[in-house]
Image: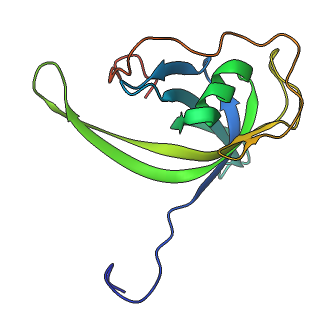
């Protein structure tokens, strides 16, 4: 069916994985918090010879507002999270004038699962707020650095 047809469209992503690095927290020029998160998911399967094969996919996650602040405060490298969101593709010109694009998941809901040093199991960050008691030793909530479009250090 064509995109302009009567059928509704859905853009929904659900991931459970581990952070490959601490979240990068920035602020837009308007003062909104933005968290960039690198998330790894691993697929385990057997090849034709019965040997276990492992393939890791890296996902770019972006969260905004209060969800971003909570991710920056309570998430750290290695932490397992459940993320619900939607795919979004952005395009821009880099400093050399080359067209660049990036497909990322815009997080609508981030649920903190196991692992990591900064959080308690089962906490959730979403536009509706934090739904569990915060840990006793939170990290700094944000940086005043502007949002930058530098993808040179990504693992993919």
In the rendered image, the vertical position of residue 14 relative to residue 111, given as above or below: below
Q: Is residue 155 above or below residue 64?
A: above
Q: Is residue 87 left or right of residue 92?
A: right
Q: Answer above or below: position of 25 versus 63.
A: above
Where's residue 152, x and y in %?
Answer: 34, 18
**Residue 59, image x, y percentages:** 53, 38
Asked where in the image residue 127 lies, by quadrant, the reply is top right
Residue lying at the far left of the rendered structure:
97
Residue depicted at x 46% and y 11%: 144
Of 22 and 128, which appears nearest the observer?
Answer: 128
Side of 104 relative to 149 (left or right): right
User: For the N terminus, which image quadrant?
Assistant: bottom left
Q: Which color mode does the image show?
A: rainbow
User: Residue 110 location in percent, x, y?
Assistant: 69, 41
| Quadrant (top left, top right, bottom left, bottom right) of the C terminus | top left
Identify the residue at image location x=41%, y=89%.
Answer: 6
Q: Residue furthest bottom?
A: 6
- Asked whether 118 or 18 is in front, the reply is 118
Residue displayed at 54% across by 27% down: 35
- The picture places residue 4, in percent across and down from the top left corner, at 31, 82
Q: Quadrant of residue 51?
A: top right
In the rendered image, the vertical position of residue 128 relative to residue 119, given as above or below: below
Residue nearest the observer in this picture, 26 or 106: 26
Regarding residue 101, the answer to whether it shows in the image is: yes
Q: Horizontal placement of 129 versus 149: left or right? A: right
Closer to the camera, 86 or 28?
28
Residue 54 visible to an observer of this rendering: no
Compared across the picture, whether 8 is left or right of 18 comes to left
Q: Quadrant of residue 147?
A: top left
* Count of all numbered marks drawn on residues in the image: 0
């Amino acid at each position: 069916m064509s995109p302009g047809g009567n059928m509704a469209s859905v853009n929904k992503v659900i991931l459970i994985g581990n952070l490959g690095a601490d979240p990068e927290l920035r602020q837009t020029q308007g003062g909104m918090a933005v968290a960039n998160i690198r998330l790894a998911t691993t697929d385990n399967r057997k090849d034709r010879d019965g040997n276990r094969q492992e393939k890791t996919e890296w996902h770019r996650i972006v969260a905004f507002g209060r969800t971003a602040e909570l991710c920056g405060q309570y998430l750290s490298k290695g932490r397992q999270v459940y993320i619900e969101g939607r795919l979004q593709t952005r395009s821009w010109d880099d400093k050399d004038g080359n067209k660049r694009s990036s497909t990322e998941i815009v997080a609508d809901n981030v649920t903190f699962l196991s692992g990591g040093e900064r959080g308690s199991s089962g906490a959730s960050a979403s536009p509706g707020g934090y739904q569990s008691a915060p840990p006793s030793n939170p990290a700094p909530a944000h940086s005043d650095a502007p949002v930058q479009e530098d993808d040179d250090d990504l693992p993919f």
